[in-house]
Image: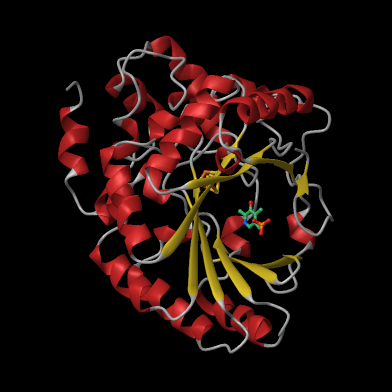
Amino acid sequence: MPYPAAVTRVTAPWQRLLAEAIVDPAELLHVLGLPDSLLPAARRGAALFPLRVPAPYLQRIRPGDAADPLLRQVLPLDLECETRPGFSADPLAESAAQPVPGLLKKYHGRALLIATGACAVHCRYCFRRHFPYADAHAGGSRLEPALAAIAADPNIGEVILSGGDPLTLSDPRLAELAQRLAAIPHIHTLRIHSRLPVVLPQRVNGDLMAWLRRLPLRKVLVLHSNHPAELDAEVDAALAALADAGVTLLNQAVLLRGVNDDADTLATLSERLHRANVLPYYLHLLDRVQGAAHFEVSQTTAEALIDALRARLPGYLVPRLVREIPGEPGKSVIA
Ligand SMILES: *Cc1c(COP(=O)(O)O)cnc(C)c1O
Ligand code: SF4
């Protein structure tokens, strides 16, 4: 294999793989055998939103292929520097929906706790690429007010850990947070939204399984995978372990131009997820965040893709096509 450095990293514990993720555009291009001519644009894009790719994800990118669908999700480009009408820094107006820093209560019956601002990978299309993570997550001294607000609202039955990526937190911290939530009588479900089982499957280890198995709540993990090539044997093993611990596994994908905007890729993604115990849940239209306009797929095309999936897959493998509209209580289902 062409990446000796990456291979030694993949056998390391997840904390080291996370810490040693590639953040230098020159190193990314070098490891993948891509031309240096891509470097100036990658540096300009990375100045707006830093590059970050962990080694296990890097290993699934085809060397020498600048059009690889996984590479496109992580390689910074000049196109990100363009401003386009209709694309804003806070497309979901989340800054306005926080009663307590780090706690979003825009969904009925559910509270979304931004447990950390950190991610294992930086996805170029991310709607939070301009979000003030450092100020807004509910870590450290902010946790108590967020927990108090959840405890004080009996309408909240489900707590969603989001981010950033909540699985970048250590198991002692997650276990403690989960125990605190389980002690609130009206909380019945813990949901985790994470890309880590995909980009860093080593994260799903014995320590995570130990507290998840013990947790007296219903457990849901919504995976974020956008392309079937993101799933390999290590990801399968991580997902099998989660399923075995009683976790309901769902996937949400973002419809991305040049990555997964064709019926074959989406159908294969659904089938591949199903083989790994995961049901497709949502297919998101892109949130119109500044710097991601080149990923947008029109709603008409998206609807045609859903029709094509419906024609060839069982109903349970067809994701719901959704869009987030600021101020709406939940997602708007389109098809
Ligand atoms: C959509 C979404 C939710 C909650 O909405 P559901 O309709 O209950 O799934 C929570 N977190 C993230 C990151 C979401 O995208
Ligand atoms: S993992 Fe999620 S929150 Fe983090 S950069 Fe990717 S899309 Fe954004």
Percent position of residue 198, x then y? 39, 44
Quadrant (top left/top right/bottom left/bottom right) for the N terminus: top left
What residue do we see at 15% from left, 29% from top? 4
Q: Is residue 256 visible?
A: no
4 versus 174 height, above or below: above
- Residue 331 in the image, given as x and y percentages of width and height: 75, 51
Quarter of the render that holds ligand 1: bottom right
Image point (43%, 19%), residue name:
68
Task: Tell me if I can see residue 75 in this picture.
Answer: yes
323 lies above or below 131: above
Res. 133 image quadrant: bottom right
Query: Which residue shows up at 57% across the image and 19% down it?
Result: 258
Of 29 and 146, which appears nearest the observer? 146
Q: Is residue 84 above or below residue 325?
A: above
Q: Nearer the viewer, residue 251 or 80?
A: 251
User: In this orientation, which residue lies closer to the viewer: 28 or 223?
Assistant: 223
Left or right of 177 on screen, residue 154? right
Horizontal side, residue 143 vs residue 106: left or right? left
Quarter of the figure with the C terminus: top right
Q: Position of residue 266 (x, y in %)?
A: 54, 28
Residue 178 lies, with reference to residue 267, above or below; the image says below
* Corner quadrant of residue 23: top left
Q: What colouring method underlies this structural image?
A: secondary structure
Q: How many marks?
A: 0
